[in-house]
Image (spheres, grey):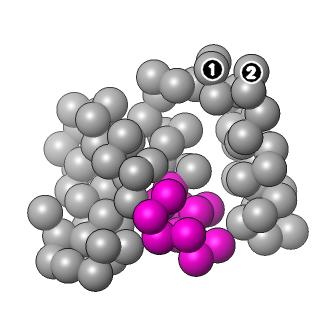
Amino acid sequence: MIELNRAVAVAMARGPEAGLQLLAEPWLEAALAGYHLFHAAVADLQRRAGRLQAAEAAYRQALELTANEAERTFLRRRLGEVVGAEPL
């Protein structure tokens, strides 16, 4: 969790590429693979970096991992933005 927060902070200060680089660490990906906020953060940074296909995949993964309806609504809206369609 601390490393996820750190990566988001670094991305805010240095741009999405810097945050994505930190989140791409294999040990971090493995440790947080089942955590929806990890995938949501990756998706947001991919979106901000202009990698819409990668963002779409990460948003879909985050959606699969959360049951919270408010979070699902947010993630669906963002997913709709990156695929260029209405929210699901």
Q: Which residue is located at x 44 percent, y 64 percent?
A: 53
Q: Residues within 10 Å of mark 2 (few under 14, many from 20)?
A: few
| Camera-side residue of 77 and 85 | 85
Q: Residue furthest bottom?
A: 84
The amino acid type of the residue labelled 1 equals: Ala
- The quarter of the image holding the C terminus is bottom left
Query: Is there a contact, CB below 8 Å, between mark 2 and mark 1?
Result: yes
Query: Which is the main secondary structure of the residues drawn in magenta?
Result: helix
Q: Which residue is mark 2?
A: 27
User: In the figure, 2 relative to 61: above or below?
Assistant: above
- The quarter of the image holding the N terminus is top right
Q: Which residue is located at x 47 percent, y 28 percent?
A: 35
Left/right of residue 7 with respect to residue 58 in the rendered view: right
Q: Is residue 47 magenta?
A: yes
Q: Where residue 47 sits in the image (x, y, percent)?
A: 53, 69
| Camera-side residue of 79 and 2 | 79
- SS label for mark 1: helix
Q: Residues within 10 Å of mark 1 (few under 14, many from 20)?
A: few
Left/right of residue 25 with respect to residue 58 in the rendered view: right
| Camera-side residue of 49 and 37 | 49
- SS label for mark 2: helix
Chain part drawn in magenta: 43-55
Q: Which mark is residue 30?
A: 1
